[in-house]
Image: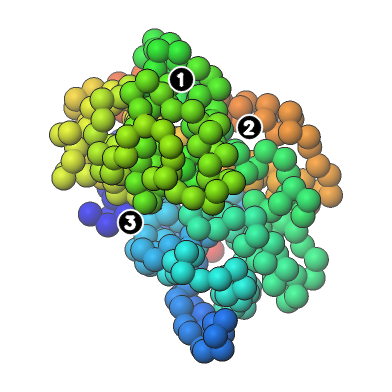
Amino acid sequence: MRLFEATQHFFNEAADQLAVHDSLRDLLSTPLREVQVQIPYETDSGKTACLVGYRVQHNRARGPMKGGLRYHPGVDLDEVRGLASLMTWKAAVVDLPYGGAKGGVVVDVAKVSERELERITRRFIDGIHDIIGPDVDIPAPDIGTDQRVMAWIMSQFNKYHGFNPGVVTGKAVEHYGIPGRAEATGRGAGILALKLMQRLNRDPRETSVAVQGFGNVGSHVARFLSEAGCRIVAISDQYGARYAPQGLDVGQALRHVAQQKSSIKELNEGNLISNDELLEIEVDMLIPAAIGGVVTEANMTRIKAPMIVEAANGPISPEADRYLNARGVAILPDILANAGGVTASYFEWAQNRQHYRWNLQRVRSELERTLTTAYDEVSAEADARNISLRLAAYMIGIRRVAFATSLDGMN
Ligand SMILES: NC(=O)c1ccc[n+]([C@@H]2O[C@H](COP(=O)([O-])OP(=O)(O)OC[C@H]3O[C@@H](n4cnc5c(N)ncnc54)[C@H](O)[C@@H]3O)[C@@H](O)[C@H]2O)c1
C-alpha cells in the first residue's frame, strides 16, 4: 500500500468513529494544491542536468501550512501527498496554529556535491517561491536536508520577497534559528517514549531499545534515551546496523559519525546486522527513525518488540498496524511521536516574527509541556474509548481540523 493510501486508511477509520459526513470528508481528504516543478541545474562538470521537485499543500484551515522538505531518490508525488496529510493531523494533535504541507526532490544527496546541492535548492525555490512564505507555507528539514539547505531556501526566497527569516525553520542557531530545534524531533520522541514506558509500567533502566536510522532524528532519540538510562542495543543507517545485546555506547557512535564521516556499519562495536534484522530482534522498544513502510505484512509476524515509537513518518502499514494492535503491541503513532520537530519549528517561526530568541532551557521546557499535554489528551481519548493511541490521535487531529474547516465555510 502506498503512503497516501495508508494515511487515508487511518484517516477514514477515525472519520468513521467521528461520523464525519461525506462532503466534509472529501474536503479534508483532498489536498489544497499540488505542484511539480522542473529543476534544471549545472553540474560541477559543466553539464546541464534536470531533477523533479514537489510541494503538496494539504490543508490550511488552522493556519499557514507547515512541513518538511525531503531529498531522497525514493521521493514521488504519492509519498509527498501522504506526508503532507500527516502534517495536517500532526500539527492539530499538538494544537499548533498550522495546516499541513510537504515537499520533496528526487535526488540522492550522496551523489551530488555541496555546490550542486546548493544550485538544486535555489532552482527548486525559483520554482515554488510564489506559493511559499511565512504566512502561507513554511518548509523545514526532513530526510536529506539540514540547516545548510534551510539557509539556501531563506536566501533564495529573500531575493524575490525581501528579508524574511520566518519563511523556513530548522535554520542554524547563528542564522535566525533557535537552540534546541535540531534535537527537537528526536528529543520529543524520547520524551514520549518515556511516557509510553510509564503507561506500561516499564522502568527505563530495564528497557532495551533498537533505533533504525541514525540521522537527525535517530541519533537524538538514541542519545536522549541512553541518557535516561535505557539500553540502546541496536542502531543503524542506510548501509547497515550494529547490534550488541549488552548495549552500545551512543556517545561513541555519535563521535564516530561526526568525526570519521563514516557509516554505523564501520562502528567498532557490536555485531553487524542488516536493517531488516534490526526490526526483528528481541527488544523491549523498537524506534523506526529512518524511512517509511518498514513494518508491513511481509515482516509483521516477526516483530518482537512490545512497544513501538514511530519517530519516522509512516513506518508501519495499515495491515501491520492492525495485526500488531491485535497482538497487544503498544504503538505511539508518528503524528504524535515525531511532533517535536514541528513544535520547535513553531517556536522558531514565532520568534523570527518577533525578532526575539528563547534560550535552550525555555525551548526544551516548552517542548516538553506541549508534547506532554498532547500525549495526555491522546492517551485519555484512547482509554475512554478503548481504542489504539493511533486512532485516538487521528480522532483528536481530525476533530480540530474539521471544526476549523466548517467555521471557515465554503466561500
Ligand atoms: N528532521 C525532522 O525534524 C523530522 C521531523 C518529523 C519527522 N521526521 C521523520 O524522521 C525520519 C528521519 O528523518 P531525519 O531528519 O532524521 O533524516 P536524516 O536524513 O537526518 O537521517 C535519515 C537516516 O535514515 C537512514 N536511512 C536512509 N534510507 C534508509 C533505508 N533505506 N534503510 C534504513 N535506513 C535508512 C540514513 O542513513 C540516516 O541515518 C523521516 O521519516 C522523517 O520524515 C523528521
**Can you say which quadrant of the picture contains the N terminus?**
bottom left
* Residue at image mark 1: 230
Residue 172 placement (x, y as % from top left): 71, 51
Q: Earlier in the sequence, mark 1 or mark 2?
A: 1
Tags 1 and 2 touching, CB below 8 Å: no
Q: Around disc 1, counting alpha carbons within 10 Å, would you say few (fewer than 14), some (14 to 19), or many (20 or more)?
A: many
Q: Residue at x 16, y 45 (%)?
A: 298
Q: Residue at x 42, y 45 (%)?
A: 266
Element carrying mark 3: helix
Q: Residue at x 74, y 30 (%)?
A: 362
Q: Earlier in the sequence, mark 1 or mark 3?
A: 3
- Taking the image as drawn, is residue 188 in sight? no
Q: What amino acid type is highlighted by mark number 1?
A: Cys
Please give the count of numbered marks on the rendered protein: 3
Depth check, mark 1 against mark 3: the one in front is: 1
Which sits in the foreground, 110 or 123?
A: 110
Q: What amino acid type is highlighted by mark number 3?
A: Phe
* Residue at image mark 2: 367
**Can you say which quadrant of the picture contains the C terminus?**
bottom right
Is 10 placed above or below 382 here? below
Residue 196 placement (x, y as % from top left): 42, 21
For the view shown, which residue lies furthest in the bottom direction?
47
Q: What amino acid type is highlighted by mark number 2?
A: Leu
Q: Which mark is residue 184?
A: none
Q: How is the image coloured?
A: rainbow
Depth check, mark 1 against mark 2: the one in front is: 1
Q: Is mark 2 within 8 Å of ligand 1?
A: no
* Residue at image mark 3: 4
